[in-house]
Image (tube, rainbow, N blue to C red):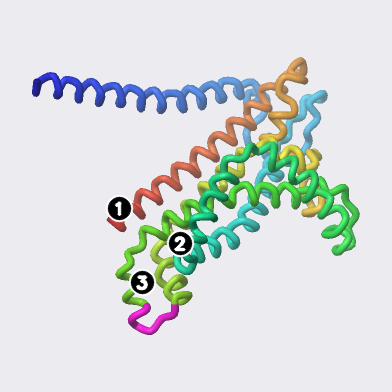
Amino acid sequence: MENKRILKDKIAQGTMGVLTLVSALLVAVLAVGLYLKSLPILETASLYELLSSDDWLPSQGKFGLLPFVAGSATITFLAIAFALPISLLSSVYLTEFAHSKIKQYVFPVLDILAGLPSVIYGVWGTLIVVPLISKTVAPFFGVETSGYTALAGGVVLGIMVLPLLISLFVEIFGTVSADLRIASIALGATRWQTSWHVVLRKTFPGIVASVVLAITRALGETIAVLMVCGCVVKMPNSLFEGVYPIPALIANNYGEMLSIPLYESALMLGALMLFAVVFFFNLIARITLRHLENKNS
């Protein structure tokens, strides 16, 4: 009986090990596949030349990726700048000040928001955010625009990452020992001072890691951003101009113009860069979070 139980344990352990290895191999296969697809364009021009050029003229063999990289960076920066203060203050309130009944209502709402399809956010952005920018925000700054802008993409993307950031922050703040809070209050600090000087300072590495995870989430978003960003191939000079992020480029064009030489390879190079950036950011975030968990254990 004992031998049978040990055998089952070894079989289960081996099975889980194999599945874990398969998962890692899938990531490697994906990276290698994207790299092989990107080789034709890399044989005609260096990566630096492709990333530093803003000429996107596929019919003439020009595949400058700089506008798309700049578009992705702009929208991601706007999204984090919009979502970070809201999510941080909301998380502090939920963990340090809110009544338990408020948490019972807020957390299910956050779960619902996190589970909504991205196309719903895109439709909402088209119906609400785009007209608001076109008719109210842009005229306030003396600008005339259709509303399909980098600002619209940043706002919609920021709202999409809010539930993720709040959930991560709440979980991280929960790792702070109650003894630290009690000691701070016993020394005469207010609850806000305790939150600022104890909780936030203690969990700062986790906050950074959470923001990095949110950045990876924002970088890969496609449909919602595609619907509101304008998809204009140019360097963004203003928040009220359209931009063209890399995911939108791939979603819009893959499979339609592959008769043009090197077109598919250029798109796959964009996908490879996106994959590399997201993988790197995720790796850094996971290492930071693991360090925080070991430090608090």
Real-space CA distance between mark 2 and mark 1, rounded to the nearest whole angstrom: 28 Å
Q: Say which residue label 2 marks.
A: 100
Label 2 sits on what residue type? Ser
Does the magenta portion include 186?
yes
Q: Quadrant of the N terminus?
A: top left
Seen in the image, is 215 located left or right of residue 67?
Answer: left
Return the disc, 3 or 1, that comes first in the chain's sequence.
3
Q: Say which residue label 3 marks.
A: 181
Which residue is found at the position 60% from the left and 61% from the top? 86
Residue 294's label in the rendered image is 1
Q: Quadrant of the C terminus?
A: bottom left
Viewer-nearest of discs 3 and 1: 3
Label 3 sits on what residue type? Arg
- Residue 179: x and y in percent read 30, 69
Return the disc, 3 or 2, that comes first in the chain's sequence.
2
Q: Quadrant of residue 254?
A: top right
Q: Residue furthest left?
A: 2
Q: Which residues are magenta?
A: 185-190
Label 1 sits on what residue type? Asn
Does the magenta portion include 139?
no
